[in-house]
Amino acid sequence: MADANTPYVRDPSKREHFLEQAITRLGRAVENEIVIVSKRASREHAHIRRDGRRVFLDDLGSTNGTFLNGERVLGSMQLRDGDQISIGEIVFTFHDPDTTTRETPFPELEVNVEAGVVRLNRHAIQLSPKEFALLIYLDENRGKVCSKDEIGRTVWSEYQAGIYDYQIENLVRRLRTKIESDANTPVLLITVRGLGYKLLGKTDME
């Protein structure tokens, strides 16, 4: 019988597979702890590995890949509560009962400038070029107040005549709809009245 705090994955049929062992094998072969009936699954496709309280997903060089929240796993990635694991057309949802649930968990925002990728709570989001430029500038100055003049010069560098406040306000509003759980009560991108805007990180809230 699994402990109440044992992490598990739930398959599309709502069956829960408890990760009681150090390594849980997933794949097409019947020897695996979780057998995946799919032609796109390799015989031994992936491992879910427990390391203390942390849980990792390891792709085993599978032909068609293992995907975490829609992105291909290259090597090993740590799992977090609510993550979705896709092997072939089968999607599992990872649950960790030991995760401390908070009333308003702080969003996890990752900005990868080189790859041109933005992830919110580990899910990739699509931004327009101007939204991305604004987010990059705010992220580079995370925790600092950025004035509208600074934002205008950086995001609209092609316009020398200046940018109107309403253009900046509209862009901020659009970006909030992409990165905030509730754009009307922002916790990431806040307004500092009379001064400008500030992008917060988790450490700013502690």
Image (cartoon, helix red, strand yellow):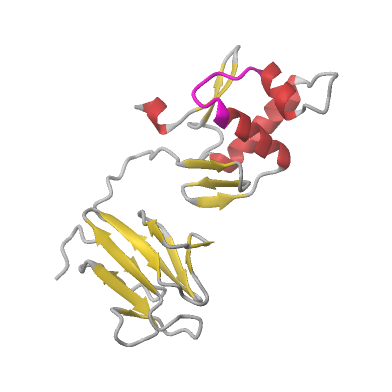
- State left or right for residue 81 relative to residue 61: left
Identify the magenta region: 139-147
- Residue at 33%, 60% (x, y): give it: 56
Furthest-top residue in this view: 194
Residue 170 percent coordinates (x, y):
70, 30
Q: Quadrant of the N terminus?
A: bottom left
Secondary structure that dominates the magenta span: loop
With respect to residue 31, does 94 lie above or below? Answer: above
Left or right: where does residue 15 sit relative to residue 4? Answer: right
Q: Position of residue 193 (x, y in %)?
A: 57, 15
**Identity of the residue drawn at 45% across and 72% down:** 61
Image coordinates for residue 180, horizontal then vertical, percent: 53, 39
Q: Is residue 95 visible?
A: no
Kindly indicate the quadrant of the structure image that contains residue 60: bottom left
- Vertical order, 38 against 180 (above or below): below
Q: In the rendered image of this protein, does residue 20 appear above or below residue 83? A: below
Which residue is at a point 60% across and 20% down the rendered structure image? 146
